[in-house]
Image (tube, rainbow, N blue to C red):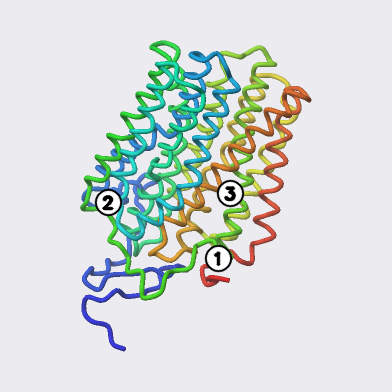
Amino acid sequence: MPHSPDSPLLTVVGDTLVVADRRTPRRTAARRPAGPLDPYRRIFAPPGAVAFTLAGFMARLPGSMLGVSMVVMIAVVRDSYALAGAVSATGVGVTAATAPLLGRLVDRHGQSRVAVPAALVFAAGATAMLLCVHYDAPHWALFLACAGFSGVPGVGAMTRARWTELHWDDTELRHTANSFEQVLDEICFMLGPAAAMLLCTLAFPEAGLLTATVLLTTGTLLFAAQRGTEPAVRPQGPRRSAPPLRIPGLRVVLGTFLATGALFGSMEVATIAAVDSMGGGPASSAVLALQAAGSCGAGLVFGALRPRGPAGRRFVAGVAAMALGVLPLTVADSLPVLAVLLVVAGMATAPTMVTGMTLVQQLVPGQQLNEGMNTACTALLVGISAGAAATGRTVEHLGAAAGYWVPATAGALALLAATAGRARLRPGLRHS
């Protein structure tokens, strides 16, 4: 059947099947970058790119503040780390469980129509949590207030979807944009926890969660207001689309991300325990930031390079480098050595995560892109929680020296999952 002039057009870009628009003229082949920073200048060339990036960063930074803010707030006010940890874990669990559903709603109804009410739900839940803590409500009320965390919008997935829409015809610029997004994630995880700790300890216990709530709500509203770069809603077709989980390659990525998340969560706890055992307790946040700093630097360099070879092969190589980079930490015996090894270990993180999210974008149909990316983030969140819990028990029973064997084990499992499923990491394989 012939296409109408305004009908969508399926086209192949690199090894990715994308939906183009006949009304949008295809750009000519991109010129070779004039310098290492030129790709980053080019991704921001489209109107509105800077605006949605700044608003998105404001909305994403609080995500890394929430856990620390809740733990410190409840531990100080209620004098119970057990209660603080349980409430924080509940909030993470609610966010992880509802993220794919929010992604599906975004795919069907658009970013602004879902992100705004979701952010207001979160603001209501966070406000309830603040009031419950301040006015000494029963413990069960704190867990009930965690329902508001179902409204944490997946702004990271929505910004990546905007980059995909803006640079649908340029594989290299999409690679640079994904690298830039990963660098922003690392910056958030460097700044967020430290800011939350300072606010809760230097101002008042509720200051961290209050600030995070204001930033997340305001940033999401500003992000949603950038309608010019919002991706159009893709037609769902006469039949309901199968869940992304039925895509074989995506299941491989999710299994790898689950183990990778466990590596991330266990690294944080193991590093805190190691620094404390070496007599540098107050320096734990600065030492933790070194891993993210190594990832940031590697991510910026990786984004300026031209990707070579299939994404699946690059993904397996990145996971292998990440798994190997953790092993030397098991024998670190001083703070200077630990600091250097953390920087080296972090250098594999951003390239691996960038390639993993690129695979998600290639494997998942365009009309399910947000759901697929939110599902990938959910796997990371679940892994982070499991890894942190496992390392806490390991350190408590076996000592700080044994802590880094948990991320080493998680890295080995991630490599096993990626290697075993490598044949499925091809965009041509769809639902099974």
Location of residue 343 in the rendering, given as x and y in whole percent from the top left corner: 58, 31
**Label of residue 113 in the image:** 2
**Label of residue 257 in the image:** 3
Secondary element at image label 3: helix
Identify which residue, 163 or 46, lies in the foreground: 163
Q: Residue at x 63, y 43 (%)?
A: 322
Within 10 Å of disc 3 (Cα), the crowding (few <14, some 14-19, many 20+) is many
Location of residue 340 in the rendering, given as x and y in whole percent from the top left corner: 62, 27
Q: What residue would you read off at disc 1?
A: 246
Location of residue 238 in the rendering, given as x and y in whole percent from the top left corner: 36, 76
Q: Residue at x 39, y 64 (%)?
A: 366
Amino acid, disc 3: Phe
Which label lies toward us, 2 or 3? 2
Amino acid, disc 1: Arg
Within 10 Å of disc 2 (Cα), the crowding (few <14, some 14-19, many 20+) is few
In what quadrant of the picture does the C terminus appear? bottom right
